[in-house]
Amino acid sequence: MKDRKEGELERIFRSCADGGAKPDRRVTQQAKSELRGRAKRAVPVAAGADGSAVAAKRAERRTIVILAAAACLLILAVSLFLWALHSGARPGALLFADGATYVSDEGLRQCTHEDEGAESPACLPWVSSEEIVCAREFALRTGAHVQAADTEEADTVLYRVEYRADDVSATVYIEAENIYLLSLGRYKRLPQEQSRGGVAFRTHTENAYTFVYFETQQYKYNLRLETTREEDVDRALARIAESL
């Protein structure tokens, strides 16, 4: 039946194309009806094709959503871990893929402690040994409770030095390369920026203190000056810039 209808339609259209007589209205109506039927039968195929495209787009969106959710969970997990380190709930150190080691205060152990008269470390060139009030060095703690290892030699990852220069008392925490002490994070976010002698300083004055942050190729310096006088701060920064 289907082949006969298709043959009839083909004959009618070919006759018209060859200049033949116009077919009877009833025949043309029948042809139109048959063409509409074909169109309706073709719709599911087209819908199926479109549906496949829509399904592919939906699958792609689902993949993006899943990856975004996984990234958010990873960020949340890392943030919670860093918070735990910072709060002391989880003492230790966390090594990141970029090579930086994030350390809580509990993740450090003191390996030296020298009072006035201690030699100024090489990483503190603007301070003479006579100006040192107290100097301490810290290494990474290798366990939750280290005793015997406290006396063993280890790489110094943090210096804490108190000194007095130009009648201004100061305390500086010096982080070794790739070491990030979480409790010193606020220094890295100090709002004011200025440059002296090629050294980029970040500063902020609060209460009776001026906080200063700057870096060299090997160290990060977190400095607290016990003054808010502009001339004292300028003198201290100039002295640092000249020594580096």
Image (cartoon, rainbow, N blue to C red):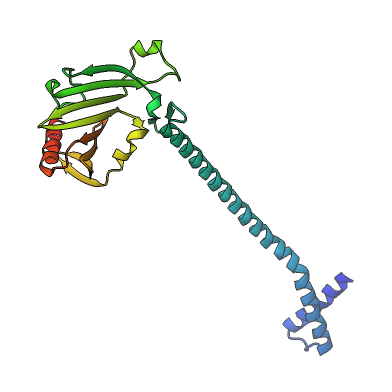
Q: Determine whether 168 is above or below 7 in the image.
A: above
Quadrant housing the C terminus: top left
Q: Nearer the viewer, residue 189 or 1?
A: 189
Res. 97 in view:
no
Res. 162 in view:
yes
**Quarter-wise, where is residue 142 in the image?**
top left
Residue 155: percent from the left, percent from the top?
A: 32, 18
Q: Nearer the viewer, residue 84 or 30?
A: 84
**Quarter-wise, where is residue 112 in the image?**
top left
Q: Is residue 116 left or right of residue 219?
A: left
Quadrant housing the N terminus: bottom right
Residue at left offset 12%, top offset 39% = 232
Residue at left offset 64%, top offset 59% = 54
Q: Is residue 185 left or right of residue 135?
A: right
- Looking at the rendered structure, the number of numbered marks drawn on it comes to 0
Q: Determine whether 98 is above or below 119 in the image.
A: below
Q: Nearer the viewer, residue 176 or 52?
A: 176
Q: Is residue 150 left or right of residue 211?
A: right
Residue farthest to the right?
A: 1
Residue 180: percent from the left, percent from the top?
A: 35, 32
Residue 53: percent from the left, percent from the top?
A: 64, 58
Residue at left offset 77%, top offset 77% = 36
Q: Determine whether 49 is above or below 134 in the image.
A: below
Residue 45: percent from the left, percent from the top?
A: 73, 63
**Quarter-wise, where is residue 168 in the image?**
top left
Residue at left offset 18%, top offset 21% = 120
